[in-house]
Amino acid sequence: MAVIEINREAETRPSKSRGVDSKLEVLVIPVADVDRAKAFYARLGWRLDADFASGDDWRVIQFTPPGSACSVIFGKNVTAAVPGSARGLYLVVSDLEAARQDLLDRGVEISAPFHGAGDVHAGPDEPYLFGSVRVGGADPKRGSYASFAAFSDPDGNGWLFQEITTRLPGRIAPDTTTFASTTDLAAALRRAALAHGEHETRSGGHDENWADWYADYIVREQAGQPLPT
C-alpha cells in the first residue's frame, strides 16, 4: 500500500471561507454519441435528472450516481473537450466487490480489483492515484483508500471505483456524521457489529450499552478518529 503524506497543519487549519459553501455538483464529460452515452449511464443505474434540447444544435443530459451529491453532464455543444478524454473519474464505494458485482449484473465490463505496488509509482499501466502500477487483487490489508476497479463508458471516459471505509483524520467534521445512502449506513453498521463482537470477547460478556458503543464507533470511524476498543 502506498504511503500517503499528509500536511498535518493544512489538515487541521479551518477554512477562511467557512461561511460560504463551495459545493462541487457537476462534472462535464465529453461524448461523441449522446444517445449511446445516455443508454450506458442509464444502464449503470444512475438517476436521470435532465434531458434538455434546443433544436439540433444543443442538448444537455444530467445523471447522478446513487448516493452522490455530484452529477455528470454530457451532450451536444456543452464542452470543447475531445470525446473520451475524461480520465480518472473516481466513484467512492464502501464495498468494492459489491459495487463491481452490481455493474457485472448490469452487463457492464469492469476490471478485476487492483491495488498499488507500495512506494512504486512508475510503470506500464494507465496512471491512477497510486501511480502507474496496478497489482492484481484488492489491497491485502484491505486498507481504506487502497483498493480499486476500473471501467469506461463507450467513448473511453475512464471511471474508477475506490473503496473507502474510514476517512483520514480531518476529512469530515467531527461533529457531523452523515451517510449518502442506506447502503453506506448498513455497511458502517456491519463494521461496527464486527468490532463490537471483538469488544465483547475481550471484555468477557454481553455489553448492554451496545447501542452507545455502535454510535461512538460509527462517528469516530467517519471522522477518522481513534476507534473504541
Image: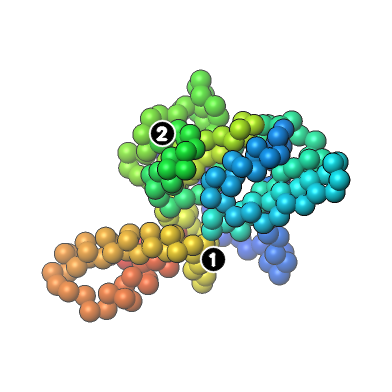
User: For the C terminus, which image quadrant?
Assistant: bottom left
Q: Quadrant of residue 211?
A: bottom left
Q: Residue at x 67, y 56 (%)?
A: 49
- Reply above or below: 46 against 14: above
Q: Position of residue 42 (x, y in %)?
A: 58, 47
**Pointer 1: what residue?**
173
Q: Quadrant of residue 47?
A: bottom right
Q: Are marks 1 and 2 in contact (CB under 8 Å)?
A: no
Residue situated in front as seen by the camera: 139 or 187: 187
Q: What is the tally of numbered marks visible in this picture?
A: 2
Q: SS class of the residue under badge 2?
A: loop
Q: SS class of the residue under badge 1?
A: loop
Pointer 1 or 2: first along the chain: 2
- The residues tagged by marks 1 and 2 sit, at their Cα atoms, a distance apart of 33 Å
Q: Residue at x 73, y 51 (%)?
A: 51
Q: Residue at x 45, y 29 (%)?
A: 134
**Pointer 2: what residue?**
112
* Residue type for callout 2: Ala
User: For the N terminus, which image quadrant?
Assistant: top left
Q: Position of residue 210 (x, y in %)?
A: 27, 74
User: Seen in the image, is 47 located left or right of residue 35?
Assistant: left
* Residue type for callout 1: Ala
Residue situated in front as seen by the camera: 87 or 183: 183
Residue 139 circle label:
none
Please say whether residue 34 is visible from this viewpoint.
yes
